[in-house]
Image: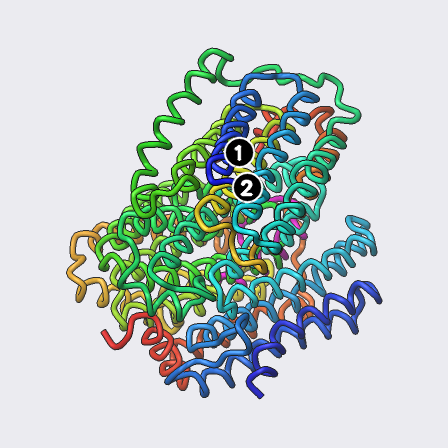
């Protein structure tokens, strides 16, 4: 791959990552959220695969394919099982309306550029130049977690946050050591499986997955 | 021999988990689980004698220094008490039909997996692997918190998993940034290994390290129960079965804290001690403030115990901020003593909850009159946790105060002491209602079987003995502190 096309592909991948983050905040239909999450997983996997092609690094390529499987196929499938049996598969009452949410995401992108100055300054390469956008995805994930009231949207927010962190790790250091990568992936998968089982129980106990029902414990 | 000492603490609880999975929760597998926890205790003790000058390593993955040895002792001591108490707890639950043999098996497996994950967090060589282990504790404990399958326990589990996973994800972000800084400081293989990080700490980029430090403090602080992400703690501790609350409060919080201490020793070299000191004092005082005010208002005794743990974690943050060898040694004594005392209290609370089917303080009064033995255990547990002699928290709190004074943290110490006094008053008031208050005629009779009393009395004896003389442990605490801060 020539240097120019490497940079282009990398920028497209990171750009797509952010684009899907924005779409995830925009859309309310839970089934669409799962499809968008899978697409974001593809964009994420494109980053290590591009880096691997550029550096002729076979191990990184294998990691990239693993990421593609986990983030674009397995995790969205687990999340999709939550959707089955959902009575009203829409986010009904988010804390912020669509316009305010999208404006907030724009503000978060600016914030991400502000806080990640030292990261870019340490080693300005095409990959680290894109790091602020990965941080923007992390912040957007947190934003989705705190403003959405359905269990599934919170799980999607958590996975978006995780996608952002994984993207940052690939952009800055071409991924964390393999043992950590494997352990972290397993942890995420297990955490999402736990959340999936909990949503099922929630539907039995509360008759729905609206998190506003969770108000019995307080001081 | 080294390989054995480092792998046995992982294998023992893991094998116990396999045993419970294969044969179900019965007397023999429960005893195997206790034996697994005792292996941690013994190996921790052996390691203290071998690590006071350096550390042992097995390959690149496992590493034990004096801090790991002390933490293994803490995990082993509290886990053996908690599993011992689980036998009676599950017997009663099974007898009443509140739980099934299948769920008891799940409980036994998850408790052992939980202990394995905590052990890995303590003896991992690599900050990334430590992170994986700490996140694994969240996954393992999720269904333990939700063991009772009520609406409230489901709510507590959801909040616990979401808040802790997000918090710990921030710590992963911090770890990635530290890795980036470490690679740029010239580290090659093993850039996240403790020794490699310590060796390069002086040349880490300050800008990136500052970001990493803030994220690591927030992230691991979530798991420790430090403000502002402490909200999961009271819910999870009050809804979990009592022996699990004992494990979470007694060791899980301090295992997360020990990871924070390791991070701190690297960050302090890179940025100087001021950066994390300011952070720790801020979150520590905020945590103490929240714990103190919620203790006053508390009506639920299990939540009261949870907020008391929050208060103790705030105090640990102040001790860590002081950061001297004396303060860190006192911190470790406090961790062990708090682990023992709080386990006793949670186990006693579990007995009260089983008898009354309520966790409201007003429903559970006059315990000392109704059951002298349970009343004694509860009362002595309160005396221990309030930091009164002869128990060890008396010594550790005084030493923490001295450490903070030596570090010229006078004003923070003053504020912390004032908040600790508020918490003290609140706990005394609630404790005296529970122990001496008038009880109505409808109060159920309290009986304490021998198998339920034994773990409590053992825990109290250990905590009392530790208060009278820490014996060889004094040297272990001091060596662990030296491993973190040098001989400062």
- Vertical relation: A36 (above or below) B172: above
Q: Is residue B446 visible?
A: yes
Side of A142 relative to B329 (left or right): right
Q: Is residue B360 visible?
A: no
Name the residue carrying label 1. A9
Residue occupying the point 51% across, 75% down = B73
Residue B297: x and y in percent read 41, 39
Residue B348: x and y in percent read 58, 59
In front of the other: B184 or B209:
B184
Q: Which residues are magenta?
A: B342-366
Q: Is residue B39 magenta?
A: no
Residue occupying the point 22% across, 59% down = B272
Residue A1 is tagged as: 2
- The quarter of the image holding the N terminus of chain A is top right
Helix, strand or loop at disc 2?
loop
Side of A89 relative to A5 (left or right): right
Q: Is residue B356 magenta?
A: yes
- Vertical relation: B191 (above or below) A214: below
Residue occupying the point 66% across, 41% down = A68
Mark 1 Cα-neighbour bin, 10 Å: few <14, some 14–19, many ≥20? some
In front of the other: B11 or B419:
B11
How far is disc 1 from disc 2 in space, using C-alphas? Answer: 10 Å
Q: Main secondary structure of the magenta part?
A: helix
- Vertical relation: A17 (above or below) B187: above
Disc 1 or disc 2, which is closer to the eye?
A: 2
Marks 1 and 2, the one that precedes in the sequence: 2
Subunit under mark 2: A
For the residues bearing labels 1 and 2, Cβ distance under 8 angstroms: yes
Mark 2 Cα-neighbour bin, 10 Å: few <14, some 14–19, many ≥20? few
In front of the other: A25 or B468:
A25
Side of B365 relative to B111 (left or right): left
């Amino acid at each position: 791959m020539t240097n120019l096309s490497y940079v282009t592909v990398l920028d497209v991948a990171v750009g797509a990552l952010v684009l899907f983050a924005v779409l995830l905040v925009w859309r309310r239909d839970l089934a669409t959220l799962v499809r968008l999450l899978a697409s974001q997983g593809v964009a994420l996997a494109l980053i290590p695969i591009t880096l691997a092609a550029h550096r002729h690094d076979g191990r990184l390529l294998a990691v990239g394919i693993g990421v593609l499987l986990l983030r674009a196929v397995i995790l969205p499938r687990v999340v999709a099982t939550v959707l089955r049996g959902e009575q009203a598969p829409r986010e009904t009452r988010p804390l912020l309306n669509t316009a305010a949410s999208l404006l907030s995401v724009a503000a978060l992108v600016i914030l991400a550029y502000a806080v990640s100055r030292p990261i870019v300054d340490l080693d300005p390469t095409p990959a680290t130049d894109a790091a602020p956008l990965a941080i923007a995805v992390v912040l957007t994930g947190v934003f989705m977690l705190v403003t959405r009231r359905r269990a599934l949207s919170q799980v999607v927010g958590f996975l978006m946050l995780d996608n952002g962190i994984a993207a940052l790790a690939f952009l800055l250091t071409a991924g964390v050591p393999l043992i950590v990568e494997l352990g972290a992936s397993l942890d995420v998968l297990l955490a999402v499986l736990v959340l999936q089982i909990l949503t099922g129980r929630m539907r039995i106990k509360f008759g729905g997955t609206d998190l506003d029902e969770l108000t019995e414990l307080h001081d | 021999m080294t390989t054995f000492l480092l792998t046995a603490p992982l294998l023992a609880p893991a094998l116990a988990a396999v045993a419970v999975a294969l044969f179900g929760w019965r007397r023999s597998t429960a005893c195997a689980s206790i034996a697994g926890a005792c292996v941690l205790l013994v190996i921790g003790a052996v390691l203290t004698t071998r690590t006071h000058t350096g550390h042992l390593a097995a390959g690149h993955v496992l590493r034990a220094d004096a801090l790991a040895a002390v933490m293994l002792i803490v995990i082993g001591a509290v886990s053996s008490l908690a599993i011992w108490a689980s036998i009676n707890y599950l017997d009663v639950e099974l007898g009443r039909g509140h739980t099934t043999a299948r769920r008891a098996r799940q409980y036994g497996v998850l408790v052992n997996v939980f202990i394995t994950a905590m052990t890995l967090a303590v003896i991992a060589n690599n900050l990334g692997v430590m992170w994986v282990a700490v996140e694994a504790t969240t996954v393992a404990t999720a269904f333990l918190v939700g063991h009772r399958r009520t609406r409230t326990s489901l709510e507590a589990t959801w909040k616990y998993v979401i808040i802790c996973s997000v918090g710990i994800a921030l710590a992963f972000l911090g770890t990635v940034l530290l890795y980036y800084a470490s690679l740029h400081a010239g580290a090659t293989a093993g850039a996240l290994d403790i020794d490699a990080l310590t060796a390069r700490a002086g040349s880490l980029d300050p800008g990136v390290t500052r970001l990493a430090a803030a994220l690591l403090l927030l992230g691991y602080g979530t798991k420790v129960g430090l403000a502002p992400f402490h909200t999961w703690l009271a819910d999870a501790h009050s809804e979990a079965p009592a022996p699990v609350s004992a494990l979470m409060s007694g060791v899980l919080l301090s295992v997360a804290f020990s990871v924070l201490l390791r991070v701190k020793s690297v960050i302090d070299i890179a940025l100087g001690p001021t950066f994390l000191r300011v952070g720790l004092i801020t979150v520590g005082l905020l945590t103490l403030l929240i714990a103190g005010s919620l203790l006053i208002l508390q009506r639920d005794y299990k939540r009261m115990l949870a907020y008391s743990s929050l208060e103790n974690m705030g105090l640990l943050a102040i001790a860590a901020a002081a950061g001297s060898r004396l303060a860190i040694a006192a911190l470790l004594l406090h961790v062990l003593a708090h682990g023992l005392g709080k386990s006793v209290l949670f186990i006693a609370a579990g007995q009260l909850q089983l008898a009354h089917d309520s966790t409201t303080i007003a429903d559970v009064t006059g315990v000392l009159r109704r059951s002298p033995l349970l009343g004694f255990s509860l009362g002595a547990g309160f005396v221990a946790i309030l930091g009164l002699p002869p128990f060890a928290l008396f010594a550790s709190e005084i030493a923490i105060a001295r450490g903070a004074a030596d570090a010229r943290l006078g004003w923070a110490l003053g504020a912390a002491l004032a908040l600790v006094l508020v918490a003290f008053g609140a706990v005394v008031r609630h404790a005296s209602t529970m122990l001496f208050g008038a009880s109505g005629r409808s109060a159920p009779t309290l009986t304490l079987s021998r198998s339920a009393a034994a773990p409590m009395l053992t825990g109290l004896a250990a905590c009392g003995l530790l208060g009278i003389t820490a014996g060889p442990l004094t040297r272990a605490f001091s060596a662990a502190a030296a491993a973190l801060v040098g001989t400062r």
